[in-house]
Image (cartoon, rainbow, N blue to C red):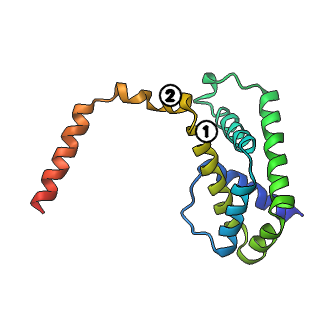
Amino acid sequence: MHGIRKVVLVSALALLAFTSNARAGVYGDELGKCLVESSTGRDKVALAKWVFVAISAHSEVKSLSAVTDADREAATRAFADIVTRLVTVDCREKTKKAFRYEGAQAFQTSFALLGQVAMQYLFEDPNVANSLSEFEKHMDSEKIKQLATATEESDDKE
């Protein structure tokens, strides 16, 4: 049982990265598909909340958030319940095969895929999309254009 807890913890931490340099094998791919297909919109929001409260604990961003210890505990419990349901009920057989044949790496890539899909789900919200695009009004677009032009010119010389 201790090994499974470690795998679940590694998988949960992989969600924070949302990407993985390693490729999943066939069993990890199947598990990833199952996790995505079996998770609801509510699950994806709960996952995002868990990531948000985890990130909000960082000393450099803590002051930007009003997340309380109770909020953190609630988000953590909700996420743990989702992971437990996904790997022991909804995707039980795929989880067993991925763990048996590909080990912890399959969990890392599978949960990273779920994390990516959950973030995409949140980014579809118009309020989130608008907030993400706010930085554009503060960028120096002329400098970006100059860089693009300089890059095109150096490509022409090669």
Quarter of the image where the N terminus is located: bottom right
Which mark, residue 62? Answer: none
Nearest the camera: 44 or 40?
Answer: 40
**Position of residue 56 in the picture relative to residue 157 (left or right):** right
Which amino acid type corresponds to the residue marked 2 in the rendered image? Ser
How far apart marks 1 and 2 lie (CA) works out to 12 Å
Answer with the quarter of the image where residue 76 lies.
top right
Question: What percent of the width, then of the height, locates residue 140?
Answer: 28, 29
Which amino acid type corresponds to the residue marked 1 in the rendered image? Leu
Question: What percent of the width, then of the height, locates residue 147?
Answer: 21, 43
Nearest the camera: 15 or 87?
Answer: 87
Residue at left 13%, top 63%? 158
Q: Which residue is mark 2?
A: 131
Answer with the quarter of the image where residue 31 lies.
bottom right
Residue at left 64%, top 62%? 109
Question: What percent of the width, then of the height, locates residue 135?
Answer: 41, 29
Q: Which residue is mark 1?
A: 122
**Position of residue 33 in the picture relative to residue 130 (left or right):** right
